[in-house]
Image (cartoon, rainbow, N blue to C red):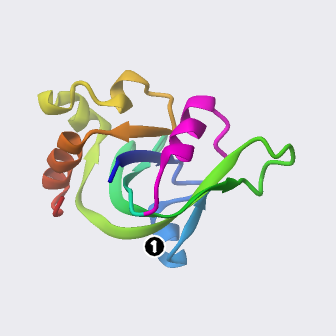
Amino acid sequence: MQFWLMKSEPDVYPWSRLVADGRGHWDGVRNHQAARNLRTMQAGDRAFFYHSNIGKEIVGTMEVARTWYPDHTDPTGTWGMVDVVPLAAARTPLTLADIKADRALAGMALLRQSRLSVGPVTAAEWKHICARIGMKA
């Protein structure tokens, strides 16, 4: 199993909508590195749901339910998407400021490539963050 962090602007697609929908498409990714990360995902992989731009915090966990397939929002057929299902809301959301201040997360892709919308998370980072947000790893 691999771990990921996936960003969404809460005024576009918030955590609450994914929970209400019960399943969502992770579409609209137009960055080659983020798209490669989507292609790498396997069913059962876990991901943090991160509210970007507004809030800037990890608010929940998700599971990849369907692997890469063509993105219906892309008329060129170049880009793909995955489907995710919500697992659990963070008991205590973890802000970007808290992540930056945590030495255990200093090497996190979120900090090294801050504009990347879909990035990897190591197993150690996953476990550490899960503990910080009040969930089982």
Give the answer, above or below, for where 120 lies relative to 49: above
Label total for image: 1
Where is residue 128 drawn, in percent x and y? 15, 45
Q: Amino acid at mark 1?
A: Val
Residue 90 locus on image (x, y percent)? 26, 61
Q: For the point 67% across and 37% down, which residue is it? A: 30
> Whole-percent x and y of residue 24?
57, 66
Residue at image point 15% right, 60% down: 134
Residue occupying the point 53% across, 48% down: 9
54 drawn magenta: no
Towards the viewer: 82 or 52: 82
Does 40 lie within the magenta span? yes
> Compared with residue 93, is residue 96 higher up or lower down, i.e. above or below?
above
Q: Secondary structure at mark 1?
A: helix
Q: Residue furthest right?
A: 75
Q: Vertical placement of 123 versus 106: above or below?
A: below
Residue at 63%, 30% in the rendered image: 32
Which residue in the protein does label 1 denote? 19
Which quadrant, please, contains the N terminus? bottom left
Along the line of sight, which residue is nearer the eye, 59 or 55? Answer: 59
Q: Is residue 67 left or right of residue 73?
A: left
Q: Position of residue 3 (x, y in %)?
A: 34, 48
Direction from residue 68 to residue 114 in the image, left or right: left
The one of 7 and 2 positioned closer to us in this rendering: 2
Q: Which residues are magenta?
A: 27-43
Label 1 crowd (10 A; few <14 / some 14-19 / many >=20): some
36 is higher (above) or lower (below) than 112: below
- Quarter of the C terminus within the rendering: bottom left
